[in-house]
Amino acid sequence: MNEYSSKLLEATVHELSRLPGIGKKTALRLALHILREDAVYARNLGNALIRMREEIVFCKKCNNISDNDFCEICTNSKRDEQTVCVVEDTRDVLAIENTGQFNGLYHVLGGIINPIEGIGPSDIQVKHLVERVNTEEIREIILALPATVEGDTTGFYIFKLLKPFEIKITTIARGVAVGNELEYTDEITLGRSIINRLPFEGMAE
């Protein structure tokens, strides 16, 4: 017997429950909330989701999500273009920006090296990073990657690739607990980790 009184409600709950961290009960609450709102709210929500999925692009410079070919951070003339912070994904950009302690640019890898999941260097934006170092006047690369085995592996790989360029390569201080993702680290701790960054070379030995 169908547990829902409406096939339309059931379909909505099914789609919402596919979102990360959303179970059937939470999906039902969300669906009923949308149903209680006026039609304009539902229409705006639907249009926002469709536009986001169809119109968002990746910045041609840093690979962050953007509305245009180049994101607002890369086109901001007040940012320090000689300092580039390398992160796993967009969530890390948002986390670091929220600290207010970094004024450089970013490079979003779009993942980290993880052989178990079949993710190698060619599956993330490492080659593009090397191209940037080779063509832009970058003074320092900050490796702000997860404090995990995969994050460290990715950091070591990037360090070896960039070492011939003789630029400063640093990593955020380990005020971020081992095993932590940046997006779950409180802003004060993350901000201090950016400010008190360390030379990567000593950690790579």
Image: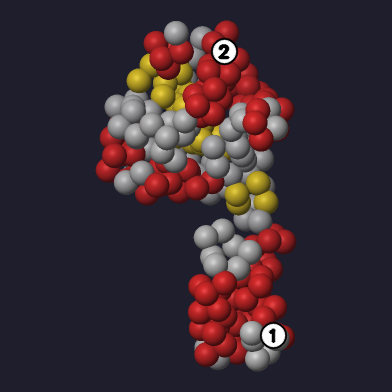
In the image, residue 24 lies at what x, y percent? Answer: 57, 72
In the image, residue 46 lies at what x, y percent? Answer: 64, 75
Q: In the rendered structure, which disc, 1 or 2, sits on the residue that comes first in sequence?
A: 1
Question: CB of mark 1 within 8 Å of CB of mark 2?
Answer: no
Asked if residue 128 shows in the view, the reply is no
Name which residue type carries label 1.
Asn
Residue drawn where x is 60% and y is 49% of the image: 65
Q: Which mark is residue 160?
A: 2
Residue 151 position (above or below residue 66): above
Secondary structure at numbered mark 2: helix
In the image, residue 55 lies at what x, y percent? Answer: 69, 60
Marks 1 and 2, how far apart in space?
Answer: 58 Å
Query: Between 179 and 95, which is closer to the camera in this rendering?
Result: 179
Name which residue type carries label 2.
Lys
Query: Between 182 and 63, which is closer to the camera in this rendering?
Result: 182
Which label lies toward us, 1 or 2?
1
**Which quadrant of the figure contains the N terminus?**
bottom right
Residue drawn where x is 54% and y is 22% of the image: 153
Render colour scheme = secondary structure
Secondary structure at numbered mark 1: loop
Asked if residue 42 shows in the view, the reply is yes
Using a 10 Å C-alpha cutoff, classify the residue at mark 1 as few (fewer than 14 neighbours), some (14 to 19) or many (20 or more). few
Residue 7 position (above or below residue 30): below
123 lies left or right of 186: right
Using a 10 Å C-alpha cutoff, classify the residue at mark 2 as few (fewer than 14 neighbours), some (14 to 19) or many (20 or more). few
Q: Which mark is residue 2?
A: 1
200 lies left or right of 88: left
